[in-house]
Image: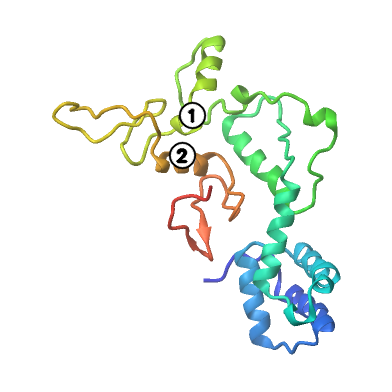
Amino acid sequence: MTPYEIISMDEVIDLLEQITARDQRTTGETDVTTWWHDLNTARINYKDAQAAANYYYAVVWPAQKEADRFRLTAPKVIELVKKVREERLENFVYEPTPGETGAEFVANYHRQRNAIASGHQPPVASITQALKPRPVKELLAGAFRTPELPPEIAEVLARRRPPGTAVACPSCHAAPNRKCHAPSTRRHPAGRELTHMHPTRLDAWATAVTACPTCEAAPGDQCTEYGRPYANGAHH
């Protein structure tokens, strides 16, 4: 299956030509195709891949002992780009749109994170913006259908309730805003309430409301690893 193209074949050829000029490797059609598949699967664009190559040969390579040096590979480019993207998102501050619905918040949040991670938008525009309070209750309005409560009660409940309880539990089928429960027994026919949450419930909530910082799966999409569904639910 061909991955969604983030970096073109021509851009990969150009990238490999720049790398070849530095370490005198020999590249062919198979190299181009393999790099194209790897970088697109990891959703690495040309600008970030080029920056990673420049950093590797200008900073990492000279700092290594000659015997320890190795030619840059696609996995190493992906590793360097992900570190840069994590650093860009370290001080991420969401910019809300007045009156946006829960669905609009999720879409805008994902769009802003992608813009910052890719370097198209600075992490924080100003200290004033960074200190601006975020109206969480308004942003999440409509994301889940819950009964309307007086603001003062809703605020207290939201502060005490773990995020994952906003969705039904895939493991025990506990309803939204209800605690997870153990399997039914003779003593507890309805199942004893648990003091903790099933991990699959937190995975389901995270998958529904936010983009994954590890594999960059969009909100509502399952996490992936090496182009396949992630076997352990969702990345932390």
Quadrant in the picture for residue 77: bottom right
Looking at the image, how many numbered discs can be counted on the residues? Answer: 2
Amino acid bearing label 1 = Pro
Instruction: Name the residue tied to disc 1.
Output: 162
In the current view of this chain or complex, which residue is farthest to the left? Answer: 186
Q: Mark 2 points at which residue?
A: 202
The residue closer to the viewer here, 132 or 100, is 132
Callout 2: SS: helix
What residue is shown at x 62% (from left), y 78% (from top)?
Answer: 34
Q: Is residue 164 left or right of residue 17?
A: left
- Is residue 150 or residue 171 the one in the foreground? 171
Q: Position of residue 217 (x, y in %)?
A: 57, 52
Indicate the position of residue 191 as horizontal and vertical percent values: 24, 30
Q: Considering only vertical position in the picture, is 68 above or below 77?
A: below
The label on residue 56 is none
Q: What element carries label 1?
A: loop
